Amino acid sequence: MKMFKQTILAAGILTAGLVSAQSAQMNNMIKVGATAGIAVPSDNVSAAVGVDVAYQNLITPGFGLGIATGYTHYFGKDNSGYNNNDVGVVPVAALFRVYPKQTGFYFGADLGYGFLVGDDKVATNSTVNRPDGGFYLKPEIGYHNRDWNFYVQYQKVFAGSNGDIASPASQDYNVGSIGVGFSYNIALGK
């Protein structure tokens, strides 16, 4: 009889936990993640790695708004005789996400300004100054569940023609990549 009561009690606790977990809504969250990618186009940088931090509020169960920042490090490469410097991107962006279902496919983007940080010169053997930043765009598409997001992304800072090297060889200054990433959702409350 004692074993039967313990089994009923354990089943009751398990059922209550499952019902509670299914009914809890995660409306506010911090997303912490990492990314890696290949530079496109790749005149002056070759690859990128980064960390992302974002706050998201689910306005409706299928639509989230928030703010995003982080740091992405782009590795400089030698090109046309120029020894290009590494550059970092620190975005300050608005975030939006669309979640058609509670678990599965999602899409969204971060839009804002990307500050470029690092060496003041585009290349160690150049006098051309690196731009300070520009319009920041990061669309992504991926898979999500309650705790994790896995995605493919494109990240770009539009700096115009600032940082281009014209002579004797031509090099357009670009800071952009296509890559993959993941993030973990930390609930801030119901």
Image (spheres, rainbow, N blue to C red):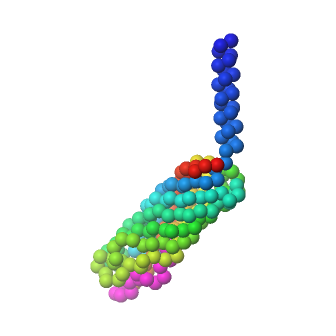
Between 25 and 41, the one nearer to me in the picture: 25
Q: Residue at x 50, y 64 (%)?
A: 69
Provide residue 60's location: percent of width, then percent of height: 70, 58
Magenta residue check for 164? yes
Rendered image quadrant of residue 7: top right
Rendered image quadrant of residue 99: bottom right
As drawn, the residue found furthest toward the top would be 1
Provide residue 100's location: percent of width, then percent of height: 70, 57
Secondary structure character of the magenta stretch overall? loop
Reply above or below: 138 against 124. above
Reply above or below: 130 against 71. below
Q: Residue at x 45, y 61 (%)?
A: 50
Reply above or below: 33 against 172. above
Q: Residue at x 65, y 13 (%)?
A: 2
Q: Which quarter of the image is occupied by the N terminus?
A: top right
Total labels: the figure holds 0
120 to the left or right of 113: left
Q: Is residue 37 in view from this perspective?
A: no
